[in-house]
Image (tube, helix red, strand yellow):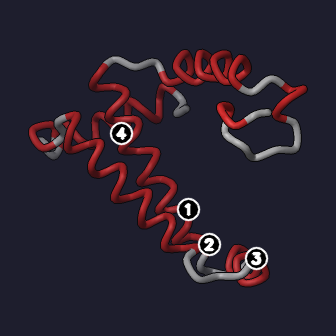
């Protein structure tokens, strides 16, 4: 997800502030959820046209900040518990390919256990 040098900067940023003590896996997961909720707020109650306009405005930076917060907490969590995010995503794609075969899933939003 993050380039190695950016992850290193992120980890060093945290270390310089002695924040590791607050970053238990549980608290990182909670923070990740909270930041994801803040990301959702950016879109809440907006029509597609309003979102398009907002993306083209100076409000876009607020969205980028929320995305960065989500990525930062996810990166800390993966780093701290030893998850290689690239391997995890690749494995999940393989699992989902089995659950959602193209011939059954293409163009559909049903959950895999609802296919007829």
The dot on residue 64 is 1
Query: Are the two marked residues, 3 and 2, in contact with CB atoms closer than 8 angstroms?
Result: no
* In contact (CB < 8 Å): disc 1 and disc 2: yes
In the figure, residue 43 lies in which quadrant?
bottom right
Whether residue 101 sits left or right of residue 63 in the image: it is right
Q: Is residue 47 above or below residue 19?
A: below
Q: Secondary structure at mark 4?
A: helix
Q: Earlier in the sequence, mark 1 or mark 3?
A: 3
Judged from the image, the secondary structure of the residue bearing numbered disc 1 is helix
Task: Determine the residue positioned at 79% across, 33% down.
Answer: 116
Q: Residue 48: percent from the left, percent from the top?
A: 76, 76
**How would you rate the neighbour count of disc 1 (Cα within 10 Å): few for under 14, some for 14-19, many for 20 or more?**
few
Q: Earlier in the sequence, mark 1 or mark 4?
A: 4
Q: Residue at x 38, y 58 (%)?
A: 35
Q: Is residue 100 left or right of residue 5?
A: right
Q: Nearer the viewer, mark 1 or mark 4?
A: 1
Mark-to-mark CA distance, 3 and 2? 15 Å
Q: Which residue is mark 4?
A: 10
Q: Going from the N terminus, do you reach mark 4 or mark 2 first? A: 4
**Mark 1 vs mark 3, CA separation in Å:** 18 Å
Q: Residue at x 62, y 80 (%)?
A: 58
| Quadrant hosting residue 105 | top right
Where is mark 2, residue-wise? Answer: 60
- For disc 4, the neighbor class at 10 Å (few under 14, some 14 to 19, many from 20) is some
Q: Pinpoint residue 26: horizontal percent, then vertical percent.
A: 20, 39
Q: CA distance from mark 4 to mark 2?
A: 22 Å
Which label sits on residue 48?
Answer: 3
């Amino acid at each position: 997800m993050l380039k190695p040098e950016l992850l290193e900067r992120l980890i060093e940023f945290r270390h310089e502030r002695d924040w590791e003590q607050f970053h238990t896996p549980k608290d990182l997961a909670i923070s990740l959820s909270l930041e994801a909720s803040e990301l959702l707020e950016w879109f809440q109650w907006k029509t597609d046209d309003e979102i398009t306009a907002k993306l083209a405005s100076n409000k876009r930076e607020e969205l980028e900040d929320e995305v960065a917060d989500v990525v930062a907490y996810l990166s800390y969590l993966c780093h701290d518990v030893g998850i290689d995010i690239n391997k995890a995503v690749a494995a999940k794609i393989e699992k989902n390919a089995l659950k959602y075969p193209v011939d059954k899933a293409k163009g559909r939003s049903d959950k895999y256990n609802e296919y007829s």
